[in-house]
Image: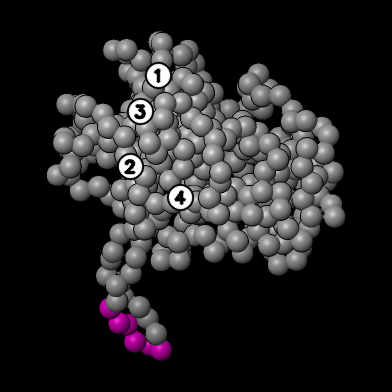
């Protein structure tokens, strides 16, 4: 039996009262992912079934794991407690009627798993918001109790879509993302270039402030020092939502899933800020979400630059202190 999760924090948005169908609402000052409470999931406005009554007795993994470490200082090793970023597998399944299929197994930081599943499926063109009936932790008999919080089933309307691109099974890792990433040729068949006019204009001063604002919202990174982040900002630099994960692509999937589940897609007129480098996969996910401006503190890859230029996106790299490189879409950056 399914039941909605109650809104327990002001950062829970849209659908907290069990409203069917995603509905946009006023954005919180910043949704930092409720890092301190991994039990909370955003109610997307469609049915969310966490499997209560079946898996309550099973420990749910959190975003951090405590460990004892030896710390060397001034030639002396002392034992101390440390907080590590949790890394565990998540299996994402899709189901329509009695037909079911595993489409991804990714190494991720637990928390906001439903957003991760929704964002991943959206970014790969498997499911639009209206296609999803429910998202649930799996209680199937073939899943051992200790793995049930590491398995998510997304129930779709109608039959399963044709999934030829998923034949590689989307076995992913937190380090490199999807192995055998789809080529630009495949992406051309799914996406069109973003509008060429100045749909958004971002000042250099706003860009200078994004890394600090992203870092300020990284609650789990502050404890572990070991997570990537993806943040959604207005053109004026106001943070709307931030997600963290050991995988930079997972952090972005969680962010896109949040936008999908709260009725905010597409994200035209917004700015994406990511920690680390910008890969082809990051740009692909940003493009499918309609994000015109992507910024990163490190360098982009050559394919990321190619994608940005072909699809009319603005790509900023090495955004540190008061400098950055513009690799594409300079018309969106100005006073």
- The picture places residue 32, in percent across and down from the top left corner, at 48, 54
Mark 1 touches mark 3? (CB < 8 Å): no
Q: Is residue 229 magenta?
A: no
Find the distance from the CA under tag 4 to the CA under tag 3: 19 Å
Give the residue displayed 54% in from the left and 39% down from the top.
25
Q: Disc 3 marks which residue?
A: 47
Find the distance from the CA under tag 2 to the CA under tag 1: 23 Å
Magenta-colored span? 74-79
Q: In the structure shown, which secondary structural element does the residue marked by tag 4 occupy?
A: loop
Give the residue displayed 39% in from the left and 39% down from the top.
16
Say if 128 sits above or below 285 in the image. above
Q: Disc 1 marks which residue?
A: 156
Give the residue displayed 43% in from the left and 23% down from the top.
132
Q: Is residue 35 visible?
A: yes
Please identify, in this view, whether the residue under mark 3 or under mark 2 is nearer the observer: 2
**Disc number for residue 325:** none
Q: Which mark sits nearer the N-terminus, 2 or 4? A: 2
Find the distance from the CA under tag 2 to the CA under tag 4: 12 Å
Q: Disc 4 marks which residue?
A: 11
**Where the C terminus falls, by quadrant?**
bottom right
Q: Main secondary structure of the magenta part?
A: strand
Q: Which mark sits nearer the N-terminus, 1 or 4? A: 4
Q: In the structure shown, which secondary structural element does the residue marked by tag 1 occupy?
A: strand
Q: Disc 2 marks which residue?
A: 6
Q: Residues within 10 Å of mark 1 (few under 14, many from 20)?
A: many
Mark 4 touches mark 3? (CB < 8 Å): no
Please identify, in this view, whether the residue under mark 1 or under mark 4 is nearer the observer: 4
Mark 2 touches mark 4? (CB < 8 Å): no
């Amino acid at each position: 039996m399914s039941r909605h999760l109650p809104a327990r924090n002001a950062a829970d948005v849209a659908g907290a009262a069990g409203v069917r169908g995603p509905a946009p609402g006023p954005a919180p000052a910043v949704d930092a992912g409720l890092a301190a409470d991994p039990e909370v999931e955003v109610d997307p406005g469609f049915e969310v079934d966490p499997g209560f009554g079946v898996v309550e007795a099973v420990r749910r993994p959190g975003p951090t794991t405590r460990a004892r470490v030896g710390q060397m200082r001034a030639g002396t090793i002392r034992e101390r407690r440390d907080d590590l970023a949790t890394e565990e597998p998540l299996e994402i399944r899709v189901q329509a009627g009695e037909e079911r299929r595993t489409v991804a197994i990714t190494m991720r930081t637990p928390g906001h798993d439903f957003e991760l599943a929704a964002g991943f499926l959206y970014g790969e063109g498997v499911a639009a918001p209206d296609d999803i009936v429910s998202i649930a932790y799996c209680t199937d008999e073939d899943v051992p109790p200790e793995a049930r919080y590491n398995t998510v089933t997304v129930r779709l309307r109608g039959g399963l879509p044709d999934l030829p691109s998923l034949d590689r099974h989307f076995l992913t890792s937190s380090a490199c993302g999807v192995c055998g990433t789809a080529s630009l040729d495949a992406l051309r068949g799914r996406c069109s270039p973003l509008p060429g006019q100045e749909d958004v204009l971002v000042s250099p001063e706003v860009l200078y402030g994004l890394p600090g604002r992203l870092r300020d919202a990284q609650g789990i990174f502050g404890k572990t020092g070991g997570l990537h982040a993806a943040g959604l900002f207005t053109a004026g630099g106001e943070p709307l939502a931030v997600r963290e994960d050991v995988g930079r692509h997972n952090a972005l999937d969680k962010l896109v899933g949040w936008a999908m589940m709260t009725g905010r897609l597409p994200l035209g007129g917004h700015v994406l800020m990511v920690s680390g480098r910008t890969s082809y996969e990051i740009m692909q996910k940003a493009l499918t979400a309609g994000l015109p401006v992507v910024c990163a503190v490190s360098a982009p890859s050559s394919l990321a630059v190619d994608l940005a230029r072909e699809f009319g996106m603005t790509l900023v790299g090495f955004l540190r202190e008061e400098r950055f490189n513009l690799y594409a879409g300079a018309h969106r950056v100005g006073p």
